[in-house]
Amino acid sequence: MFKAIVSADTLRDTLDSVSVLVDECKIHLNDDGIEIRAVDPANVGMVDLTLSADAFESYEADGGLIGVDLSRLEDIAGMADAGQLVQLELDEETRKLHIQIEGLEYTLALIDPDSIRQEPDLPDLDLPAQVVVEGADIDRAVRAADMVSDHIALGVDAENERFYVDAEGDTDDVHLELEREDLIDLEAGDARSLFSLDYLKDMNKAFPKDAEVTLELGEEFPVKMHFDFAEGLGSVTFMLAPRIQSN
Amino acid sequence: MQFAEFAARATEIEAEPADLETVALVADLFADAGDDLPVLARFVQGRVFPAYSERKLDVGPRLCREAVARAAGPNVDADDVEDRLAETGDIGGVAASYDVGGQRGLGAFTDGDDDALSVREVYDELAGLAAAAGSGSEDEKVATLFGLLTRCETDAEARYLARLVLGEMRIGVGEGAVRDAVAEAFDVPIEAVARALQVSNDYGLVAATARERGVDGLADIHLEIGRPVKAMLAQAGSVADALDSWRAAAVEVKFDGARVQLHHDPAGETRVFSRNMEDVTAALPEVVEFADAHLDTAAILDGEVVAVDEAGAPLPFQEVLRRFRRKHDVERMREEVRVELRAFDCLHAAGDDLLDDPLLARHETLADLLDDTDAVSELIVSDDPEEIEAFEARALAAGHEGVMLKDPESAYTPGKRGKQWLKRKPDVETLDLVVTGAEWGEGRRAETLGTFLLSARTGDGYATIGKVATGLDDEELADLDDRLAPHVRDEDGQTVDIEPAVVLEVGYEEIQRSPTYSSGYALRFPRFLAVRDDKDPADADTLARVERLAEKQS
């Protein structure tokens, strides 16, 4: 059983955070909210999302699991205006999702969850450095790095209490530094890891530009990037595995 | 087995030049394969799925280059990979030359999990990749390959993974080596393995059966409705070849169509496969309808699909191609090009494999099965060349391509291009022509006549038809020079006029109309075959015969 009403904005934010990484996903319809965990086909990037039942106008669910084609669902959500409400109801018999937006009714065929890539185990990460920045700062760093390279190094200089970004191209380089006072928060610890910009650019699309994003970093370890949405009732964590530099 | 272990073995096999040693190494690999035996029996040949399977990776070189580039590291793009590939031509070597394992997967940071690739995981990932279809599937394929490459810890893993994906292992292991290695590893006769492979085309199944159930198990592998086998193939040959080898020849029309293998299950579906075992059922609905209407028992038939006109007469092969393998507009094209089945062999009927039955018995079974005689090839058995020629003349007159000659006693051997089936090629016609002129040779041959003008007999003289200068060695040239010298009538610079005296047998590929020679014809690619000592100019071929031959070839 699943029946819920949610604002179009919240629904779109939810879907967009996952669709930057995968085309299809499983959605757990728990009694206290929904949960999505997905990994890209190369097992390099992962998203872990929860949206509390309190973020919905109304919410009834009892622990079901559905598989959805994200771009299809995004298209439907795109039919709603910003403030409009979207009503979702699962038909258990036909395994279809009925979606109503004002007078519009859309019946969405679901995907067999077993045909979707298995949900990943969460890596067990104990990361020494934590940086809290505005989403816009990451956007700036990613765009600058993208001008010269397809990889980006994220690091924390513990001694000088700095967060820095390096990108080395064939000819040109980019370096960007943020001091403690430029940051919302910093837990200093030595950290530096290199990441594929292909993935980070996609994840960057999901970051709210005007809100806090928390980065957790280590030495040649995955980065965890966390932010809240839907007024704190939704939570997204991206994880991205590093490229190890052999020299 | 870990994929690294397989890659190490493949490296060893690739480095082994001797065939017997190669088979021994593959046999060792199979003996140690455990549960991965079926997969490894294919991987060593650069195959992920059985040859008959519809599953295909559908990964081209471009996607592979992209995946390698993504794994290769900072600032390497597909063009860089292509540049390296242009130098070596080996995607495996290129993949191994980069640090593809530099990008880690998240699996490497999950507690307790070993992130090293196993053979099984490579297979499972590639199977998942093969299932990807539709929009976005290319990206997903690249991402999956990229993910596999990032988990390669050794250069050898990257090398053989990239080669496997493109279907070319380059380790010198073909079907024969795998067959012999299965026999060696599990101590079963090679013939038993070969037979099981012929009827199943499934190296994994055959290897596992040989290991678990030995020679008895292999004998239990039979044809299966829905699992295609390779088509038996024919060599080129003549009526003389056929009648020299067999007591009589079975003669059939050679249809100008597309070879198909039809599998009919009365309780299930009918499927049609191409000679490459590709499923072409969807493109040929009327063949399926025909089989459903005219067959009432399980059967595997071999035949051709031909395009026919309103009257049922055959149309050229190009028309069939408009239908074959078509995925779209099948119904519309069905209106435009009518196709029909012409069956000529029966591999399986009502639960019995007939491969070992003699050809004539199989053909009889075929005729019994199909209650439509138009769809069954007409077959005569004859040891009389004239009767065969008459049959061929009828076949050609009806618009067919020619005739097939088959050994009436022969078994059906899938995939073999043996001497039991012959495509009759037209006899190479030769002409006996009179030398009526010549030209002095050039360079080294300036001292002898080098090019000879040939003529055919007409009612009252000779008409030129071509020049022959090839096919003669120095000795033959000197000999001809001696023979012709007494008959030289006149010389004008390079050219020499010669009175008709010497007859040459000449081969050619075609007779063309031509204004160059007085006969109005010219020989294409004429070549000297012999001096006809036994013939006088009066015995040489006539222009009338040349005209008849020209007529026949059009």
Image (cartoon, coloured by chain):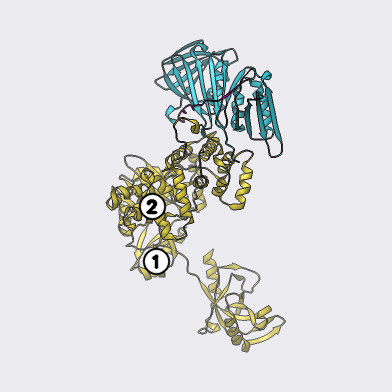
Chain colours: A cyan, B yellow
- Rendered-image quadrant of the N terminus of chain B: top left
Q: Magenta stretch containing residue A128, yes or no?
A: yes
Q: Residue furthest left?
A: B216
Check contact, mark 2 vs mark 1: CB within 8 A.
Answer: no
Few, some or many residues within 10 Å of mark 1 (<14, 14–19, 20+): many
Q: Secondary structure at mark 2?
A: helix
Q: Which residue corresponds to mark 1?
A: B388
- Estimate the x, y position of residue B470 in percent, counting from the top left: 59, 74
Few, some or many residues within 10 Å of mark 2 (<14, 14–19, 20+): some
Q: Main secondary structure of the magenta part?
A: loop
Q: Magenta stretch containing residue B352, yes or no?
A: no
Front residue (pair B233, B321): B233
Q: Is residue B51 visible?
A: no
Q: Secondary structure at mark 1?
A: helix
Front residue (pair B308, B228): B228
Q: CA distance from mark 2 to mark 1?
A: 53 Å
Which mark is on residue B28? 2
Q: Amino acid at mark 1?
A: Ile
The answer to whether residue B537 is above or below residue B71 is below
- Give the image quarter of residue B389: bottom left
- Residue stretch rendered in magenta on the structure: A117-132
The answer to whether residue B456 is above or below residue B154 is below
Chain holding disc 2: B
Q: Amino acid at mark 2?
A: Asp
- Estimate the x, y position of residue B284 in percent, counting from the top left: 44, 44
Front residue (pair B328, A108): A108
The answer to whether residue B241 is above or below residue B92 is below
Q: Residue B415 vs residue A133: left or right? A: left
